[in-house]
Image: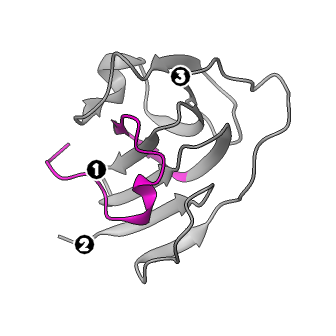
Amino acid sequence: MRTRIVRLIAGCGAGLLASVVAVLGTGPITASANSCPARTVCVWSGPNFTGQSNEIPAASFHSQWFSADSVVGFHITSAENNTNSSFWLHDEATEDFGAICGGGDFAASFPFQSGYFFIQYNVPQGCGGNPPSGSP
């Protein structure tokens, strides 16, 4: 199985892995309509925070892979992570992974629509490693 990782490096200290193919942006987002409540990941169906939107409370959905369709009702393309946890996405069609490291309020638009997500609860530096184990 091929694994390609696309991640937003935000507060994740250490160097990049060789498998990282793109950095989508860094730094906190500015206050806007995309502000997400604390301990929540806000998600959108379209690129650049467009389309359907929903919120994922980290305390309720963490430590395992979840179906985006089952939890939020659509595949995820954009996300804002305000959880102090690492938020991973998996694209089942291409086997790509995406991540937004925790430790602040950070956002990214991914080059795929993800059907699965994983919140590494209270692991803000989790993006320095590989995607969470287990199968989405």
x, y percentage for residue 104? 65, 40
For residue 124: magenta? yes
Residue at mark 1: 92
View extreme (right): residue: 31
Q: What's the CA distance linking mark 2 and mark 3?
A: 30 Å
Which label is found at residue 44?
none
If the image is split into quadrants, where does the C terminus sit?
A: top left
Residue at mark 2: 2
Q: Nearer the viewer, mark 1 or mark 3?
A: 3
Quick check: 85 left or right of 2? right
Q: Residues within 10 Å of mark 1 (few under 14, many from 20)?
A: some
Q: Earlier in the sequence, mark 2 or mark 3?
A: 2
For residue 119: magenta? yes
Q: Earlier in the sequence, mark 2 or mark 1?
A: 2
Q: Amino acid at mark 2?
A: Arg
Q: Residues within 10 Å of mark 3 (few under 14, many from 20)?
A: many
Q: Earlier in the sequence, mark 1 or mark 3?
A: 3
If the image is split into quadrants, where does the N terminus sit?
A: bottom left
Which residue is rendered at x = 52% and y = 50% of the image? 101
In front here: 100 or 50?
100
Location of residue 119 by image quarter: top left
Q: What's the CA distance linking mark 2 and mark 1?
A: 11 Å
Which residue is rendered at x = 55% and y = 60% of the image? 12
Quick check: 32 left or right of 50? right
Magenta part of the protein: which range? 111-136
